[in-house]
Image (spheres, rainbow, N blue to C red):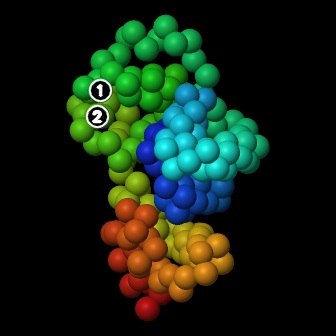
Amino acid sequence: MRVLIDACVLYPTVMREVLLGCAAAGLFQARWSPRILEEWARAAAKLGPQAEVFARGEVATLRRLFPDAAVIYDTGLEQRYWLPDAADIHVLTAAVAGSCDAILTMNAKDFPRNMLADEGLLRLDPDGFALQLLETEPEIVTPIAQGVLAEARRLSDLDWTMRRLMKKARLPRFAKALDARLA
């Protein structure tokens, strides 16, 4: 399954690490456009110049780890589409140009399912998608989440629990299912 990942999913670190860990494991093919990556870096800049520098480093790492993920298209194609928020048309265009099956986003209102269906696309929310991956491939997804938890503990010097970390990352259903598996 080819999934275009919106900037709002790439920006929260824990969410990004879980989902891209699943993509790296071959559970789906991650896609994004250069503009989506730029949106991520600019969003991080709101936390300060150091955060933007870090985000740009992360973007460079993603480009290296996922060399086939970038969807390049003629921006003139954007004129074919309409969405409630015109600023998101580039996401839809990249998904269509990249022959994606779905758009992974937290912005449900900006991507109406009926409009995406007209283009043969699904809209997926990160929590539901992570939960689906966990339910279908628990032996792959559980160690990915455990690795993200270990890294969060190392970087923050806090004794995170899996459930608390994943809930903070806006993955509450995924957190609950992981907690049940690990109990």
Q: Residue furthest bottom?
A: 183
Q: Earlier in the sequence, mark 1 or mark 2?
A: 1
* Separation (CA) of disc 1 from disc 2: 6 Å
Residue at point 55%, 28% (across, down): 35
Could you say where residue 150 lies in the image, as x and y percent from the top left? 62, 78
Of residues 43 and 63, the one nearer the viewer is 43
Determine contact: label 1, label 2, CB under 8 Å.
yes
Q: Position of residue 18 (x, y in %)?
A: 54, 62
Q: Residue at x 61, y 45 (%)?
A: 49
Residue 171, quarter of picture = bottom left
| Total count of labels | 2
100 versus 174 height, above or below: above
Residue 137 is left or right of residue 82, and the answer is: right
User: Residue at image x 60%, y 50%?
Assistant: 51
Q: Give the residue number, with chain letter if any, for mark 2.
A: 110
Asked if residue 5 is positioned above or below residue 94 in the image, the reply reads below
Which residue is labeled 1 in the image?
A: 85
Please give left or right for residue 116 compared with residue 114 in the image: right
- At label 2, counting other C-alpha atoms closer than 10 Å, the crowd grade (few under 14, some 14-19, many 20 or more) is some
Secondary element at image label 1:
loop
Q: Nearer the viewer, residue 26 or 153?
A: 153
Q: Given the image, on which type of amino acid does mark 2 rest? A: Asp
